[in-house]
Image (cartoon, grey):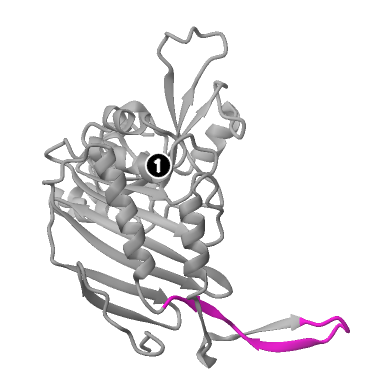
Amino acid sequence: MSLHTGSTGLFKLPLELRTIVYNFLLIGTQSPHVNLFYCLAADRAPTQNTTMRLFLSSSPLHPKFNAEVSILRTCKQVHEEATPILYQKNTFTVSLQRTYQRHPPMWTPASWIHRDINLLTLASYHAKLFTRIKVFMDEMTGLVPDTIMMLFPALRFIHPISKFSDGHLRLRSREIGAYALHKFSTSPNLKLTCSFGFNWAEHCSGDEGLTADKERWFSQIIEYKKESNGVVWDRLDDGSYQERVVNRWYIPHFGPHRELMKRVKNALKEQGFDQNIPLAWKFRTITSDEKPLFLVIDLEMKKRQNYIPCEIVGAFGEISRVEGLDEEPEMDSHGLTG
């Protein structure tokens, strides 16, 4: 990086116009994914503090951060003016993991530098600039809220994301999410939304009640076919191909969402969540070609509404309707528009 402040080109513009340029280049439509690793040295006594290292994920599972961060390397003045915009106005997606190695298994110092050189170099002072994050709640337990607030003291918006499945966790993830909501809700300056997702393809190990509910909901799934969905070609045993219309599946009502909402409410109550804090709810069903449907419950704190926006989202069209908090209106035979 050049240390000069620059006197031509960009710096002929007033700061207001330079800020517009920085916003255009540095605010991406995709959320940059950050992995936070607890590095636990094998020879360290259990009573000693662990160190936290931040790694920007370049996994193909996460979309590439589409911001032109190379502008930060042009000169010192640009770096000083633009860096706060990069970290304060993008919403970062954060995952927390533990490792007993100085660098996680998929990282080495050399590969870390190589992978990072065209993106971001994260450091503790960068984390202190973050104002907006999404955080996955399925890889850590009760340490999440305290860790997040410690690492990102300037947070103004946080969106925890949790799943309705146990997996390898000691606690059910909805209980973890409820605990996190309870902790985060104590911050008066923090705007908080949360999503609880239910993926039909995942197992509900350790939760017999949820497993039974899943089987009951599965019996209500309807196959949706439409010519505009497109076609696929299935290969037959004789080597020929047969045309088939792409299928999607959906449930023509939001009963499962309401039952999942009750589970979230119970988990919040068990975690001591302040019942006087207003909550707004939203139900979503997400469909995609040839894949199981995905149910999502969103809630937003500090906001009370007497209705629930409901959506079924998919390439075949959308339904967007409003239901009362205690209402379950009937839908038409397809429940879809478009």
Give the structural element (helix, strand or loop) at label 1. Answer: loop
* Residue displayed at 88% across by 84% down: 238
- The answer to whether residue 63 is seen in the rendering is no
User: Can residue 47 be found in the magenta stretch?
Assistant: no
Residue 37 vs 223, above or below: the answer is above
Viewer-closest of 201 and 117: 201
Q: Amino acid at mark 1?
A: Met
Viewer-closest of 250 and 265: 265
Residue 215 vs 120, above or below: the answer is below
Where residue 105 appears, as percent x and y from the top left, is 61, 30
Q: Which residue is mark 1?
A: 137
User: Can residue 241 be found in the magenta stretch?
Assistant: yes
Looking at the image, which residue sits at the far bottom?
Answer: 227
> What is the quadrant of residue 259 in the picture?
bottom left
Looking at the image, which residue sits at the far right?
Answer: 238
> What is the quadrant of residue 143 in the picture?
top left
Where residue 116 appears, as percent x and y from the top left, is 49, 38
- In the picture provided, is 94 more to the left or to the right than 168? left
Residue 322 vs 161, above or below: the answer is below
Where residue 72 appears, as percent x and y from the top left, is 34, 41
Label 1 crowd bin: few (<14), some (14–19), many (20+), radius 10 Å: many
The boundaries of the magenta stretch are 235-251
* Residue displayed at 42% across by 34% down: 121
* Residue displayed at 19% across by 67% down: 325
Viewer-closest of 126 and 146: 146
Give the quarter of the figure containing the C terminus.
Answer: bottom left
Where residue 213 appears, as percent x and y from the top left, is 46, 61
- The answer to whether residue 323 is seen in the rendering is yes
Give the quarter of the figure containing the N terminus.
Answer: top left
- In the picture provided, is 126 more to the left or to the right than 325? right
